[in-house]
Image (cartoon, helix red, strand yellow):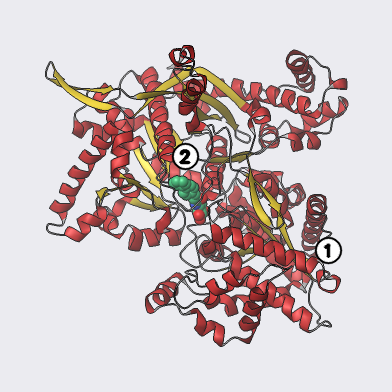
Amino acid sequence: MNFQPDAEAVRTNIEEKLLRHFGTVPASATKEQVFKAVAMTVRDILTRRRGEFKHLANGCGAKRVYYLCMEFMLGRSLRSNLCNLGLAGTYRDVLGELGFDLDEIFEIEPDAGLGSGGLGRLAACFMDSLSSLNYPATGFSICYEYGLFKQKIVDGIQVELPDIWLPLGEVWLIPRTDRTFIVRFGGRVREVWNDGRLEVHHEDCEEVEAVAYDMMISGADCKAVSPLRLWRARDLHKFNMGLFTQGQYTRALEESNNAEIISKVLYPSDNHTEGKMLRLAQQYFLASASVQSIIRDHMATYKTLDNFPDKVAIHINDTHPALCIPELMRILLDEYYFDWERAWDTVTRSVSYTNHTIMPEALECWNEALFKLRLPRIYEIIREINERFCREVWNAFPGAWKRISDMSIISYGQIKMANLSIVGSHHVNGVSKLHTEILKESTFKEFYRLYPKKFTNVTNGIAHRRWLCYINPGLADLLDECIGPGYRNRPELLSDFLKFSDDPAVLGRLGEIKHHNKIRLAKHIYAKTGQRIDTRSVFDAQIKRMHEYKRQLLNVLKIIGLYIELKENTGLDLQPQTFIFGGKAAPGYHMARRIINLICMLSREIESDPGIRERLRVIFIENYNVSEAEIIMPATEISEQISLAGKEASGTGCMKLMMNGAITIGTLDGANVEILDAVGKENMYIFGLSSREVDELWLRGYNSVEYYAQNERLIKIIGCLQKGFAGESFADVAAYLIASHGVSDPYMCLADFESYRLTHESMIRAYSDREKWNRMSLRNIASSGYFAADRAISEYAREIWGIREVDSKAAYADTTS
Ligand code: 26Q
């Protein structure tokens, strides 16, 4: 039976934590203290349940999955843990009696922002489903002291501040000082033959200790609790007393800090690599500590590595943790004396890989010479993997030099991590249907010819309990009433909601729920920015990382067009519209920062014009993160998914918005294609070039001036950009959009502009028939079940990892027999 405290126990536990940790009582405790005390009691429940589940899983010898990712963007945990455990009501009552409001306590928690965008949030959603479906799973990542920077907008410009999350956030972390491993960098490798076997010694290297901090991830209405193990770097030689006594005080401090720098800060770029040696150190640190931990657990249970691939699935989320492939080889060869073939067989039957991008600048490469200096033994192993692989390709395609050079793991002084990942994995997964097709036909075409069976498609999914039930309780209540609560554990049942498409009462309720959520967002925006937005205007949101390929610029061009129209024709009868943007730019990404600046200046100019701002509003929401998303998603009516076709691997924000009843305007890109399949073209607005047309246009040569010169509107819009907004010229952005040579827009905004504008216009017309709009909204909600992470995880489990749910009855039968 799952451990579940009653109200009396909850109250006593909270009081006890307050007294013991803060020497206080509820009547005089601060909200921070109450948050911490409450979180500690929840952590205790989770730890206890984890013990019970581990016992069950061990009892049946279940195969486990280990999910490695450099990022886990968890957001806040208290609400989701309480809801998942079915304890939200009890805690609300108890805290009420103690004089606190649970919702206010939720607000105290900082976001755990250990991720930069979609990849990191996907990892967090997947942990939720792994637990909820009772799969035996562990996540591995780094315990960054600073997560993704905090974004401030000062005079319309992004300023980055450190994200200090640990003082409060670490309440969820359980330090496992009994789980530490040594990770080695630099030095030399010495090989000696001893008693007929090769011994590999690592000399003069720097040693860093990896210390485990576990965060317990709850699932909903289930037995499982899964650990997310976060590694923190600790300097082994904490302090160099020698230097200290020689009076070199600062040098002693510097040296002691050096190793700990590894887990200091998350790299803030997404869909772009930075070939920095510190990033390489972070990646190896994660890979090495995690593989050592996996082997230790496995040996503790089975006392042999013979059955390793039957009991262990290691998944690498993008290439960032790919060094676990040579690291596992190293341990099997050097520490367990496997021969090469047996070690390679073990590795390639255990590891699988998901690719998340086809943007060339995001495919990781490391400089061979620097890599060799930093990780000499790992380098030797990669060389050997590569030599054997190239021989295999040669045998399959004799004389095909070009092909071998494309597929080689090392070429022209670069180590290509995607090639290493494909060669070392039993499956290579793409994150949407279209993305998988592009991987097979273009990015990894040669690999697909060699290993056609390796390639799979499991389309991404989102944690629907968090992104629907918990953040949109009004909608969840309506669904409970109409179709019963079964969809909470079986998201495919959301389709039952279709039965209500023609029920005017339900459609009316949907409209009211949306309006209520819009009021909540409007209040939030007022508190943050002082801007009072009209809740009867249509809420149109583009919330995601700032990136050229996502084309926030295309959206801005459309808004400028509307602005010009309103200025030219003051009597124009236009449905009031509020455009909401949110997203961070990588600090070194100039154009992305310029786009933020443009949005903010346009917003400011409109704000100063009373005649316009009643009908057209632009809002830039500062510091877009998981918690901000949780307020914006339920309030949004139009979801902007307008990347250039072929560039967005999947997108997951599109799924969250759809599930909350927003209607999508989008290109045929990433998961949009499957949203269209699910909801039908009557309930979605598609525009623009297809990915094939994009490729053709690219080959022919995209000439922006062709689109510009023929379009009166575009001429005016570009003119407006050149003149600028609120005193700031954007002539540089205008030049980028229309240049036919030199620096120009590779994402072809102007090619899709007219089709985008017309499609948006027809959407705004449709909005005036509110019942029809609500019906579209209902159909989107009812068709969103496919995009639940529960579905994605079941597919991964079955098709890629070969793991099964832990069934409590079977487990007991096993242990008792
Ligand atoms: C690599 C090396 C050095 C520094 C940084 C990086 C790095 C970090 C993060 C490279 C890429 C990322 C993140 C990529 C990402 O978030 N991709 C998104 O993944 C989502 C989940 O599959 C998809 O839905 C999105 O389409 C994809 O853009």
What x and y, as percent, mark residue 693? 44, 75
The residue wearing badge 2 is 69
Q: Amino acid at mark 1?
A: Asp
Q: Can you say which quadrant of the picture contains the C terminus? A: top left
Identify the residue shown where x is 40% and y is 50%: 429
For this view, does 130 lie left or right of residue 14?
left
Q: Can you say which quadrant of the picture contains the N terminus? A: top right
Please say if the residues under marks 2 and 1 sit with CB atoms less than 8 Å apart.
no
For this view, does 247 lie left or right of residue 394?
right
Q: Amino acid at mark 2?
A: Cys
Give the residue furthest to the front: 247
- Give the vertical position of 752 relative to 19 (above or below): below
The residue wearing badge 1 is 534
The local secondary structure at tag 2 comes to loop
Q: Answer with mark 2 or mark 1, whichever residue precedes in sequence.
A: 2
| Callout 1 crowding tier (Cα within 10 Å): few <14, some 14–19, many ≥20 | some
